Image: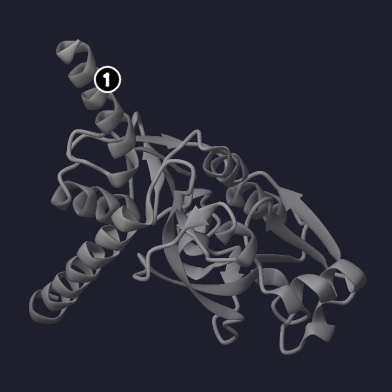
Amino acid sequence: MKIGFFAILIATILIGSWGNGHADDQFKLCTDEWPPYEYKAGRTIKGINVTTVRAVLKRLGHDSNQIVSASWERCLQCIESGHDHAAFSAMKTRERMEYAIFPDEPLGTSHWVFFIREDRSDSLRFRTLNDLKGRRIGIVKGFYYPPDLLAYAKNNAKLEYARDPITNFLKLLDDRLDFVFEDLAPGVHMVEKIAAGGEIVPLVNTVLASEPLYIMFSKNLVKPEFVHRFSEELKRYNIKRCFVLIFHG
């Protein structure tokens, strides 16, 4: 009887401890193709935020974790259903906060601009929302966009949704879009990837939004206590990274 009681007790503790992020737990994380933050290089997933997330989890005792690459829409579904423990890089929204927990400390900051074809730079500009009237705008399913811009574009422009960002740049190169709305760093990276550096340019003088980027944890699988620990460790990691950049370039 005693053996049976203790076996049940231990099993209960092990099951309940998963969401606390104990060192022997393996996290399953989902991310999309969004270089330089996260991207596939052969069979490996690399990127600035991939390195950060791995480093912070390692500091918390998690050396081995599974990172899978999927569409961002799919990543969000996996967090909501509890299939995956976390997804990144994400912007915080009220809708996502219903099923996910966000750390206080972000992974970094995104700067959103419009990209256009270089040969149309004389005729296309963006100073006010009215400049979008009647234009074809490429965005990605599941991505967060400034509500005022999205509301105006839905009523006055033609929104074209893609599964991933690079599809939008290929459509822009083929003159099937007028604007692509994208974070500056990934946008420049993808333009270079499709060898369109001289043909597609960002409107760098107009940053429409600067938004912090986060890792988001599933409420179904991860407890707030662990997310708080992750946030504190991430803050220390970011401070150290800043010092390295300042003193070592």
150 or 41: nearer the viewer = 150
Residue at left offset 72%, top offset 59%: 138
Foreground pick, 201 / 128? 128
- The residue at which mark 1 appears reads as 8
Q: Could you tell me the amino acid type at mark 1?
A: Ile
Q: As drawn, is 63 to the left or to the right of 169? A: left
- Picture coordinates of residue 57 (x, y %)? 23, 49
Q: Does residue 109 appear in the picture of this structure?
A: yes
Q: Identify the residue at image location x=24%, y=48%.
A: 54
> At 30% across and 28% down in the image, what residue appears?
12
| Between 130 and 116, the one nearer to me in the picture | 130
Q: Residue furthest left?
A: 247
Quarter of the N terminus within the rendering: top left
Q: Pointer 1: residues within 10 angstroms few (<14), some, or many (20+)?
A: few
Q: Does residue 176 appear anywhere in the picture?
A: no
Q: Is residue 122 left or right of residue 65?
A: right
Answer with left or right where residue 79 lies relative to residue 88.
right
Residue 60 % position (x, y): 17, 50
Quadrant of residue 123 within the rendered picture: bottom right
Indicate the colouring scheme: one colour
Query: Within the image, what quadrant is residue 18 found in?
Result: top left
What element does badge 1 sit on? helix
